[in-house]
Image: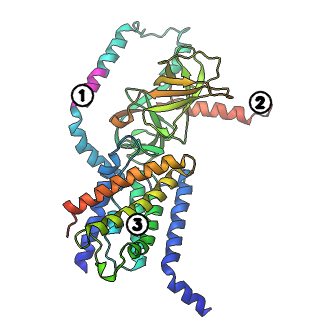
Amino acid sequence: MRSLFRFLIKNYPFLLFIFLEAISLVLIFNFNNYQKVKYLNSANQVTASIYNSFNSVVNYFALVKINRELAHENATLKTILQTVPRIEIIPDPIFSEGVETDSSFRFISARVINNSVNRTSNYITLNKGKKHGIKPDQGIISREGIVGVITRVSDSYSIGLSVLNQRWSISTKLKKNDFLGSLAWGANEYRFANLLEIPFHVELAFGDTVLTSGYSSIFPEGIMIGTIQSFLQPEGGNYYDIKVKLSTNFKALTFVDVIDNLNKAEIKKLEHLIQDDPNNN
Amino acid sequence: MIRIIIKYAVMFISLVLIQVLLLNQVQFSGFVNPYMYILFILLLPLNTPRFAVLMLAFLLGITIDIFSNTLGIHSAATVFIAFIRPLIIRIISDREEDRSDYPGLKQNKLRWFLYYAFLMVVFHHIVLFYLEIFTFSNFLGTLFRILLSTLFSVFVIVLSQFIIFRE
């Protein structure tokens, strides 16, 4: 027994090393299950406020560019307003039933205070949180296209997975023939992602536009994702190998919009009912 | 004693801030990311108790992890190099008189410091990158990234020795 103690005391650095490595590994595996760890992430008060104050200084240098972008977006929106036929103030009782679904999204503007593109799992930290109405599972878009989805929220900050993250995929459709697929990032280049589940019989062309499908309650239908950069037919497979050039430049994100789906609770409840229904199977 | 503690505390905070605010935003060709923060472990005096080195390494790693949402990865890599540091020092300094108590650039020969920094950085990056990817598929591709990142990290670390932290 005494020699055991002597052994332990003599080798304490090694035991401490094993202990600390074990803690690290436990943290790695628990963090993968990413709802568990609550405070040890960059949405906590201390880290987020450091990022926020640093970012507000850096943003001064980007103000010219941001102004130009906002002016450009204003112009685009005005052009769209011109082309849309005048909206009736008294809704048409027959027509309004079908149109109403599109007005169920609310947009919350937020500033990106931390962002990365070079990891295998990239995250975005935003300067809006619970008190601004942000909740987990809301979509994030920018002027250029899709950005990510909110996963964790603190009082005044929030974190989202960006598209550049292997932990999720996005339901997509091709603009020209509405064919459904899913988009996943291959953890290599920040400008490109892979489009999966498109069978060989679909006709594709270089530069085809890929949009969100609207089949999930995260994103509304028709948000820009990117354009097809290249596609090939792998031997022995059933699906194309498609490389999509993302329309969003993740290196230059400044302002984004968070999408709040006002009908989400109702949709979820309805879908839940079907899953519970024994007659369904 | 107090002076040394304050000096290392300032170094800790400034290295963490430099890492998360500046270097994490730097990307050469998408994937190469220099990690300078382990300079703190490199520069701890050689007579620091081993448990203190390990605990400080864990604290440093977890701080970087919290900032970059990679919980556990940096702390595992940093604790690993803190553990093998005495071994590396023993291997690269063959004569007893070669060693100075403070393993900085000024107190030792440039060649010694380059060896030291390179070995520490390369082991740190091997653990870090393979834990981050968590697969041995595309083994060589990851190895190439490790070597490229190591070159940048060593460059930044040696450069910093010439500019600041001269003591």
- Name the spot of residue B108 as percent of width and height, x first: 26, 72
In the image: residue B43, left or right of residue A38: left
In the image: residue A248, left or right of residue A195: left
Residue at 32% x, 72% y: name it.
B44
The CA distance from mark 3 to mark 2 is: 53 Å
- Location of residue A146 (image quadrant): top left
Residue at 54% x, 61% y: name it.
A25
**In this view, the mark in front (2 or 1):** 1
Q: Are marks 1 and 3 on the same chain?
A: no
- Name the spot of residue B98 as percent of width and height, x first: 30, 78
Residue at 45% x, 27% y: name it.
A245
Relative vertical location of residue A216 with respect to residue A11 in this rendering, above or below: above
Q: Residue tagged by mark 3? A: B59
Q: Secondary structure at mark 1?
A: helix
In the image: residue A46, left or right of residue A103: left
Relative vertical location of residue B31 with respect to residue A12 in this rendering, above or below: above
Could you tell which of marks 2 and 1 lies nearer the N-terminus?
1
The CA distance from mark 1 to mark 3 is: 41 Å
Q: Chain of mark 1?
A: A
Give the colouring mode of the picture.
rainbow
Q: Amino acid at mark 3?
A: Leu
- Name the spot of residue A151 as percent of width and height, x first: 49, 43
The CA distance from mark 2 to mark 1 is: 53 Å
Does residue A142 show up?
Answer: yes
The numbered dot on residue B97 is: none
Q: Chain of mark 2?
A: A
Q: Residue tagged by mark 1? A: A67
Q: Amino acid at mark 1?
A: Asn
